[in-house]
Image (tube, rainbow, N blue to C red):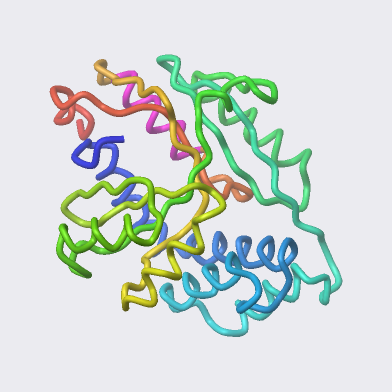
Amino acid sequence: MAGHNKWSKVKHIKAVVDARKGKVFSKIARELTIAAKSGGGEPDMNPRLRTAINAAKAANMPGENVERAIKKGLGDLDGTVMEEVTYEGYAPGGVAMLVECVTDNRNRASSDVRIAFNKGGGSMGSSGAVAHMFQRRGEIKFPVAAVGEDAMMGYALEAGADDVSMDEDEYTLYTAPDKLYAVANALRERGLAAAGAKLVYVAGTIITLTDANTAKAVIKLYDHLDDLDDTQNVFANFEIADDIVDQLDS
């Protein structure tokens, strides 16, 4: 999505609100658990876990919470087993959505996602319904204040990134999925600490919403899905036309 688009601002504001509500901790904890489960508990040997630990530190997550989440992933604590599952569906206006969940109850997660789609005027699809519209990529974010634009472009391409975009707040670097952590590490060695590094789904074709009511409905559904207890990430293939921006706050 274009960096100047209203939707980018909406997501940025939502991230700030989520941080205040403590939702960031729960999402980081789930990522720590899954990272440890999939790659082991040694950060030096598990780039995904190392990145999650860095995110936890940046969010000032208590150390005991980090340790507990990692132990949960390693099976050192009695209790539930977490798994990753992705659901697909359509929002109003034909917008495609992918919902990544980390859950200890697949049936509950599926039911919650289906209800959210139905209440939001959309529909949940079967596996493969919209996934073909997205490409799996690595995404790394840096604050604009970290380095100048020309320098960031040079460093990113030298490190192996495929693309760099920029808005007034941050740089976003895209990589091949298997190069995500290598690129992040190369930039870290240059003294550039990433604000975030994760695998994402990037839409191949973007739908531009030109009707304010449809845009409001899509954002409302996005928020509902993102607020579900098991949701880790929501990806969608829309942007919002500039001429209806002012109507979104009414």
Q: Is residue 227 above or below residue 224?
A: below
Q: Position of residue 150 (x, y in %)?
A: 15, 58
Magenta-colored span: 213-224
Q: Residue furthest right?
A: 78
Instruction: Say which residue appears at 36% left-offset and 24% top-offset.
Output: 206
Q: Identify the residue at image location x=36%, y=69%.
A: 187
In the image, residue 196 sits, relative to residue 43, either above or below, namely: above
Q: Residue furthest front?
A: 158
Q: Main secondary structure of the magenta part?
A: helix
Q: Is residue 228 above or below residue 180?
A: above
Instruction: Please provide percent x and percent y for residue 239.
Output: 30, 28
Q: Quadrant of the N terminus?
A: top left
**The magenta stretch spans residue 164:** no
Query: What residue lies at 29% left-to-right and 21% top-to-bottom?
Result: 208
Query: 167 or 7, which lies in front?
Result: 167
Check the picture and name the quadrant holding the C terminus.
top left
Residue at the image position 52 percent from the left and 69 percent from the top: 51
Number of dots carrying numbers = 0
Q: Is residue 227 left or right of residue 147?
A: right
- The x and y percentages for residue 148 are 15, 64
Counting from the top left corner in percent of width and height, residue 174 is at 39, 48
Q: Nearer the viewer, residue 203 or 216?
A: 203
In-image side of 183 versus 248 (left or right)? right
